[in-house]
Structure formats: structure tokens, C-alpha cells
Image (cartoon, helix red, strand yellow):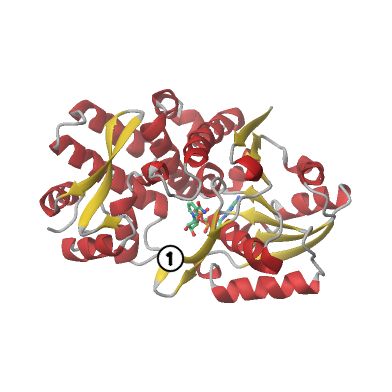
Amino acid sequence: MLVRVRVDLGPRSYDVHIGEDILPQLGQAMVAAGPGRRALLVADGAVANSHAPLAASSLHAAGVETHLILIPPGESSKSLEGAARLYDACLECGLDRRSFIVALGGGVVGDLAGFVAATFMRGLPFVQVPTTLLAQVDASVGGKVAVDHPKAKNLIGAFHQPRLVWCDVRTLLTLPAPELAAGLAEAIKGGILASPHYYRFLAHQRQRILERDGPTLARVVSGAVRVKARVVAGDEREESGARATLNLGHTLGHAIEAVSGYGTIRHGEAVSIGMVAAGRLALGREMWSQRWQAEMEATLQGVGLPVRLPAPLPARDLLMAMSHDKKAVGGSLRWILPRRPGEVVVIPDVTTEEVMAAMAAVGVAV
Ligand SMILES: NC(=O)c1ccc[n+]([C@@H]2O[C@H](COP(=O)([O-])OP(=O)(O)OC[C@H]3O[C@@H](n4cnc5c(N)ncnc54)[C@H](O)[C@@H]3O)[C@@H](O)[C@H]2O)c1
């Protein structure tokens, strides 16, 4: 079964297709999405043997002249040097402005290839074929593309919406379990912020999800994509504030990633701890119940996500990192807090005392 979710952005609208075993149809879908018949297929080295050959043969079969380039796995590939290597490849392959850049991999490959697609010849059509759960539920929707600067993640980037997103949940069968869990953190976040029905589905179908049952994984992805597509459609370039709600768990999550050193803890794991802290803060304001907090923690733990830091980090460093983060507005910290499953609120004036109490609850050394 193929599910199609529309991301409604006027002339930049596109469809996210989700299904099991749909990689062989990628080429036909791409031919339908644009007139170009040449593509640079940018693939994560980890999928070189498992999924890249099928993607490449699907493009060839559809009449698309395809050049494959492999990217070393890991965040360090998401750099200006990495982008420069791809620009060289674009030139060597003779890409023109109708040619496609196709990203086959997780968020790293998606962000890097998308950045190159946004900038080479002032923009080429971009196709995302995400192969991690995190990239399927989150990174592939919304058009944010970027490379890292040595001083900060995602500092150099653009908004460049894909023409097409092709999520084959079969590619998730080769994903290591901690990477699957990291993606589930963003899915659970989507449920808490906008869909109680989806949130309950994730909690109840935990076993099937962890067993990687195909139709269940397709529902996981389509549910999260629907939530994100709705939010992004209302605030494409993060201007009205609606898109900020997607940052539930990210205020502390980003600080944890920065202070512990990028790569020490996965983004989804940091977001899981960040959501627990946001819940604690909301509890302190009596806007969220103890029962919902316990349910959220059980749901996160049930899929293998942490609800406390594995080792304490200093509160002072985390506060400093949060104040540098783009979610700090005019001195006071802006947090996204849950009000009930399916609803969050943006609180612009969270105090340091509240943050300290919430951080202590997730194992920060205060
Ligand atoms: N653009 C956005 O909106 C957005 C949103 C969230 C995250 N991101 C970015 O995404 C990145 C994180 O994404 P990620 O978690 O997908 O990380 P990732 O791309 O590093 O992939 C995680 C690991 O899984 C491996 N892998 C990928 N697909 C596989 C498969 N099918 N089988 C086996 N191994 C596979 C990769 O080699 C890597 O080791 C970060 O750079 C983050 O900034 C972007």
C-alpha cells in the first residue's frame, strides 16, 4: 500500500510517499515529478550495498542517467568540504538546472545533498529518499537543508523544498536498533504536540514497531509526516511561530547534544530527555498532569529511549548552551510545554529556577 501525504506550500507543494517495498518505483515517480533525465544519486556509505543498487537501477530503468556518489557515514560529512566534493561531482556529471539531486540516506545525507541542490546553479530539483526513521518522520519534511560550521550545527543552510519524498519502510530493516529508537523520539514528539490518536497508536503498537512490522512502520511514518506537514504548511520559513512547536524537547535537547559533544548522544535520545524535562516544567506550572507525565516517560522508555541523562552534565554549561540557542529570545528562555497529549504551548518567559528544577529531574548536576 502506498500512502501519499501532501505538503501544501503553494507553488512549492510536494508529496511524501510512504510504503513498503516501493524503492523499485522511485524512478517512475521521479520522471513524473520533473522533466530532467540526469541525476546525481548521493548515498550514505552504510546503504551502498543494501539499498543504493536498487535505487540506482530503478532510476536507470526509468531512463534517468544516474551517477552514484557515496558519502562516508556520520555527521562530519555534513560540512562545507563535503559540499565542495559534491559540487565537483555535479560538474563532472554535467548536471544542468533540470537535473535531479537525489539523497539516499539519513538526515546527514539529506541535509548535505539538499544544501548542494539548493545552491548549485542557484538551485536544482531535489528528491529525498530517507533511509533512517528520523529522516523519514522528520528531516525529509519542511525543506531545511544545511551543513555544519565548526562552531555550530546547521549554521550554513537554506530552505529548499524537495520535489518528491520517497519513504520505503523496508530500508529501515537494516537500521541499527538505537537509530530506530532515535527516530521514534521525534514520532512520539509529533503525537504529543498535535495528535493524541497517533500518540496512543505509538504507545499501543510498541511491540509491532520494534519488530519492524512493515504496515505498522508505514503508519508510524505517515502519522508523523501528517503532523509535520500540517505545521510546516502553516509556517514554511519559521516566521509565524507555529513551526516553533516542533521544538518540543529541543531546548534542553540541543544543549545536551552541544555540551556532551556532538555524536556522544543521538539527537533523538537528547530530545527524549528534553521532552521529559519539558513535562516536568509543565507539571511545576500545573498545566500538565502527573499521569500524562508518567505515560510519556513509559512510552519513551518502552521503545528504548532514555528519560534521564546517562551521566550528569553541569547545569551551568547547559544553561549557557541554551542561552546561545536560537530559541532564547531577549534574555528569557522560550520553552515548548505540553498542555495535554496533542496540545503544546510556547512559553516565552521560563525562569532559570524552573529550568534548574526540570534539569535536576532528568539527572543534571545542579
Ligand atoms: N532538515 C531537517 O529538518 C532535519 C531534522 C532533523 C534532523 N536533521 C539532521 O539529520 C541528521 C541526523 O539524521 P539521522 O539520525 O538520520 O542520522 P544519519 O544520517 O547520521 O544516520 C544515522 C546512521 O544510520 C546509518 N544509516 C542510514 N540509513 C541506514 C539504513 N537504512 N541501514 C543502516 N544504517 C543506515 C548512517 O550511516 C548513520 O551511521 C543531523 O545532521 C540533523 O541535524 C535535519
Residue assigned mark 1: 153
Q: Residues within 10 Å of mark 1 (few under 14, many from 20)?
A: some
Residue type beneath disc 1: Lys
Snapshot quadrant of residue 328: bottom left
Q: Nearer the viewer, residue 27 or 305?
A: 27
The residue carrying mark 1 has its beta carbon less than 8 Å from ligand 1: yes
Snapshot quadrant of residue 39: bottom right
Residue at point 40%, 36% (across, down): 188
Q: Is residue 306 visible?
A: no
Q: Quadrant of the C terminus?
A: bottom left
Q: Residue 215: percent from the left, percent from the top?
A: 60, 28
Q: Nearer the viewer, residue 349 or 343?
A: 349
Q: Image height check: is 344 above or below 172?
A: above
Label 1's element?
Answer: strand
Q: Quadrant of the N terminus?
A: top right
Q: Residue 55: percent from the left, percent from the top?
A: 75, 50
Q: Is residue 282 visible?
A: yes
Residue at point 82%, 69% (across, down): 94
Residue at point 78%, 59% (across, down): 99
Q: Residue 268: percent from the left, percent from the top?
A: 41, 49
